[in-house]
Amino acid sequence: MNNNPPKERIASSFKQLSVVSTDLNLAADEFSKTISTLDEALKSLKLGVSAWHKVAGHEDEQYGDFWTRDIGYAQVKGKWGIAIRKTWGNNFHDHYEEEVWPFADAPRWMCIESIGRLPDLFDDLIKRTEETTTKIKAKTSEARDLAAAISQAASELAPKTQAIKAKSGRK
C-alpha cells in the first residue's frame, strides 16, 4: 500500500499516465492505420452492401432483454467502412437501441475484442454480397417488365396527348 499523501500520489500517477498514454496512442495509431488499409481495399470494391458479425452478446429468453457487440462493414456518418456497434433492448417490448462507430472512433477495448472476427465478417460480407447480387438480378427482370409496360402505355398515349395539345393550342 502506498502511504504517500494523496496529492503526491495523484501527481506521480499523472506523470506515469503521461508516459504510458504516449505509448498507447502510438500503438492505437498503428492499429488504426492497418484497419484503414482494409477499409480502403473494401471501398475500392464499391460493394454498397453491409454485413455485421456478432463478437459478443447475450439474450435473456425469459424476459427478452438482449445486448450484442458486433464488427461490421457499413455506412456510418455517410462513409462506408469497417465499424463497431453495440445494441441492446428487449424483444418482448419492441425496444431496440444501437450505437455505431467507425472502427477508428470506437472504444479501444471493443476494437481489440473484435479484431479477431474480421475473417468471419469477410465471410458474412461475401454471403450478403452474393445474396444481394441474386436479388438485384431477379428485380432487374421485374424492373424491365415495368419499364416496358410504361413505355408501351406512353407510346399509346402519345397520339392522344398530341391531339389534346393541338386542340388547346399548346405545343
Image (tube, helix red, strand yellow):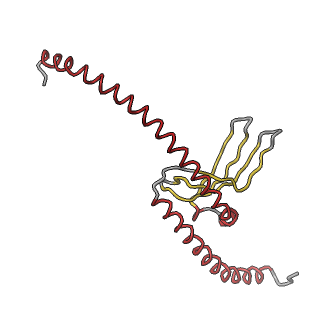
Q: State left or right for residue 2 relative to residue 65.
A: right
Which quadrant is home to the N terminus? bottom right
Position of residue 113 measured from the top left corner of the image (x, y, whole percent): 70, 63
Q: Is 37 above or below relative to 51?
A: below
17 up-or-down from 49: above or below: below
* Residue 46 position within the rendered picture, expressed as x and y whole percent measured from the top left: 45, 55
Count up the numbered dots. Answer: 0
Q: Nearer the viewer, residue 142 or 103?
A: 142
Q: Position of residue 75 (x, y in %)?
A: 52, 52
Pick the front one: 151 or 91: 151
* Quarter of the C terminus within the rendering: top left
Horizontal side of 16 relative to 159 (left or right) equals right
Whether 137 is drawn above or below 46: the answer is above
Q: Between residue 66 and residue 161, name the one nearer to us.
A: 161
Question: In the figure, 105 relative to 50: above or below?
Answer: below
In the rendered structure, the answer to whether residue 116 lies left or right of residue 2 reads: left
Extreme residue in the left direction:
169
Which residue is at 54% across, 65% downward?
A: 38
Q: Residue at x 39, y 29 (%)?
A: 145
Looking at the rendering, which quadrant does residue 103 occupy?
Answer: bottom right
Residue, x 72% and y 38% (percent of image)?
A: 91
Farthest-out residue, right: 1
Q: Position of residue 119 (x, y in %)?
A: 63, 61
